[in-house]
Amino acid sequence: MFDVDIKFEDICVNNIEEEDLRELREILRDKKFYLNDDELREIYLECYMSECEIFTKILKKGKFIGVFRGRIEFKSSNMIWISYFYINNKYSLKKSNQDILMNILDYFSHNFGVCDFITGVTNSEKDMIDMWKNNDFRTVRINKEFYSDKDYKEDLMIMKKYNSI
């Protein structure tokens, strides 16, 4: 797992540890894509074993309030693919969520030369789309029916923030 240690104001963003999984599961319980214990542990182990995976907990005054997950790629233009960013609604305010996200992105820009940040959002997640747009992410592609089975079809919007340095 890529080592992350971010501190600002009363927020800390650090790597998820195995003992954090139970608490992570609790704050994700009401989410659309809920994961059971085995699925969450499998994701943790995949991230733990990969040097470019980012899997962090977000703490406010020591309290577990959210998660940031992604993958860093060092290429001609260093980038991070953000697979998950979530702040528990109990602790979230629009402005503080944006501050947390921007501090995370700034950390990777300034410390590791990351220029591009990319994420995928389903078209039904209007609040998340607005949050990414408010942080200067722009839609670069739409994958039609990316999530699809006989009863469910949903597009995936790929959004990108350019030249963050």
Image (tube, grey):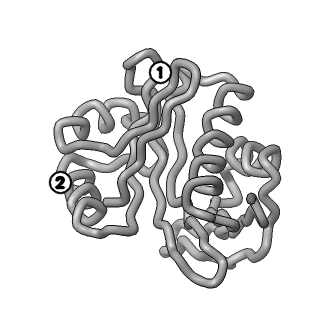
Image quadrant in which you'd find residue 89: top right
Query: Looking at this view, is 1 or 34 the one in front?
Result: 1
Left or right: 91 as drawn, with respect to 132: left
Would residue 4 be found to the left or right of residue 137 on screen? left
Q: Residue at x 66, y 78 (%)?
A: 77
Q: Residue at x 41, y 48 (%)?
A: 4
Q: Nearer the viewer, residue 121 or 5?
A: 5
Q: Position of residue 112 (x, y in %)?
A: 55, 61
- What SS does tag 2 mark? helix
Residue 56: x percent and y percent?
40, 45
Please tell me which residue is depicted at 61% across the width and 34% down the height of the picture. Answer: 100
- Using the image as rendered, state which of residue 154 and residue 14 is in the foreground: 14
Q: In the rendered view, tell whether residue 13 sits above or below residue 125.
A: above
Cα distance between the residues tagged 1 and 2:
27 Å
Residue at the disc numbered 2 = 38
Q: Secondary structure at mark 1?
A: strand
Identify whether 63 is placed above or below 159.
above
Circle 1 packing at 10 Å, graded few (<14), some (14-19), many (20+), is: some
Q: Which image quarter: residue 15?
A: top left
What amino acid does circle 1 point to? Answer: Lys
Kind of residue at badge 2: Asp
Residue 144: percent from the left, percent from the top? 68, 78
- Residue 28 location, x and y as percent? 40, 37
Q: Which residue is mark 1?
A: 60
> Mark 2: few, some, or many residues within 10 Å (few <14, many ≥20)?
few
Q: Outermost residue toward the top?
A: 61
Residue at 53 percent of width and 74 percent of height:
148
First reached walking from the N terminus: tag 1 or tag 2: 2
Q: Nearer the viewer, residue 23 or 151?
A: 23
Instruction: Give yes or no for contact between labels 1 and 2 (Cβ–Cβ under 8 Å).
Output: no
Q: Is residue 162 above or below residue 67?
A: below
Locate the C terminus and report the quarter of the image it occupies.
bottom right
